[in-house]
Amino acid sequence: MSVTEHIDGERLWANLMELAEIGGIAGGGVNRQALSDEEFSARELCISWAEAYGLGIATDDIGNLFFRVEGSEPDLPLVMTGSHIDSQPTGGKFDGAFGVLAGLEAVRAVIDSGVDHKRSIEVVAWLNEEGSRFAPGMMGSEAFVGVRSLDEIKQVKDKNGVSVEDELARLEDRFADLRKLPFGREVFCFVEAHIEQGPILEKEKTPVGAVTGIQGVRRMRVKITGEEAHAGTTPYDLRIDAVQEASRVIEKLYEAFSDIEDIRFTVGMLTIKPNVPSVVASEVLFSIDLRHPSSETLATCEKRIGELVSQSVTNCSADVWCIAEADTITFDENVIGAIEVESQRLNIPCRRIFSGAGHDARQMSYVCPSGMIFVPSCGGISHNVNEHTDQSDIVAGTEVLCATLVELANRLEISSKTESQI
């Protein structure tokens, strides 16, 4: 039997459904935000599966979770796979979770088959990919590769004033027995399995996508500051209404970016103060998520946002700043090629595809050859309780992941990062 014949599709699907019960919400979705009690329980479940297969289990100072099967030459830089188990407040069963559980199923198949692999293979559940509770996301992978410092990340607070540092202390208490690994470990390559979160693979009836890169993103905040006043007694001409001004700004921003090809402009979060019915608002804070395949276009649009906000605000004051930025990246051709070759060997149709969504693989591409495997999202739906991927596609993607990991774990060399990744 080949290694992929040891992939147990029923077990994998059952594991995904069991994990989805933790933080499960009405409609079949999941609310399992980073460093919450629900996410802690999800960690415990994943650890129990890893223990059953004798995997090495460890964590690090940011709370990433690692599951390892040793290779015959364990001193060689390791092959890594994985994704995340945190979700949006109204997320689905598969976003992130598929990549972690596909990785666990792949290493189970490696163990059950007894296949030779020189390099150790490690499955990771990155901390806070989503950024729904603590913004911005990608905290675990960014700390791992050194893009952001641990001290900076620890200071981030959620809407209730709870800090990452507070919750990491709680996490450490709950998982005090786990071995701690340092940041900066040498990784030979990284391959992340994920649902597409878009409609292309399903539309083309293609079960696997070999991801070529990830488009750039700017995550921004805009604060409009006015003055509180009584809603019943203050005439319009005497109001300094932050909601009125913010509404005007948001409308003009959407109009400005509606005609730019391939742009993705989203205002997804608004916070209003004092947020009571009979008081004119003194402050509106809103988010901007800006994405485009061209880093140059992205930079131009970011500058344009600042200009439009300044031009649109008349009575209030306004501040605009960027909380996270990343340019478009291209994945390593050798990793992409390995995914394509293994798909062909398994007789599983595969096409190259570009990612519009951000993933932890972006951060890993800064330090090692990296790539991603996509599987279809039904209706292109994600970040939604109706998110779904067919079981047959889940299994196909996991088989390709498993074969690709074994192939890469037996390679002695792989290309260095391309110029566009540096």
Image: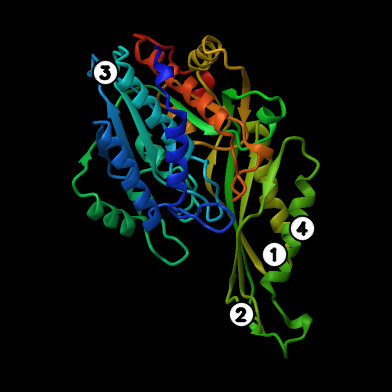
- Give the CA distance from mark 3 to mark 1: 56 Å
User: To which residue does mark 3 refer?
Assistant: 71
How packed mark 1 is, by other alpha carbons closer than 10 Å (few <14, some 14-19, many 20 or more), is many
- Give the CA distance from mark 4 to mark 3: 56 Å
Residue shown at the point (56%, 54%) measured from the top left: 90
Kind of residue indicated by mark 2: Val
- Where disc 3 sits, the SS reads loop
User: To which residue does mark 2 refer?
Assistant: 276
Answer with mark 2 or mark 4, whichever residue precedes in sequence.
Answer: 4
- Give the CA distance from mark 1 to mark 2: 17 Å
Whether residues under marks 4 and 1 lie with C-beta atoms below 8 angstroms apart, the answer is: no
Please name whichever residue, 244 or 128, is drawn nearer the observer in this view of the structure: 128
- Where disc 2 sits, the SS reads loop
Answer with mark 1 or mark 2, whichever residue precedes in sequence.
Answer: 1
- Residue 161 % position (x, y): 41, 66
How packed mark 2 is, by other alpha carbons closer than 10 Å (few <14, some 14-19, many 20 or more), is few
Residue shown at the point (62%, 48%) measured from the top left: 386
Answer with mark 3 or mark 2, whichever residue precedes in sequence.
Answer: 3
Depicted 239 relative to depicted 265: above or below: below
User: To which residue does mark 4 refer?
Assistant: 251
Whether residues under marks 2 and 4 lie with C-beta atoms below 8 angstroms apart, the answer is: no
Answer with mark 4 or mark 3, whichever residue precedes in sequence.
Answer: 3
User: To which residue does mark 1 refer?
Assistant: 246
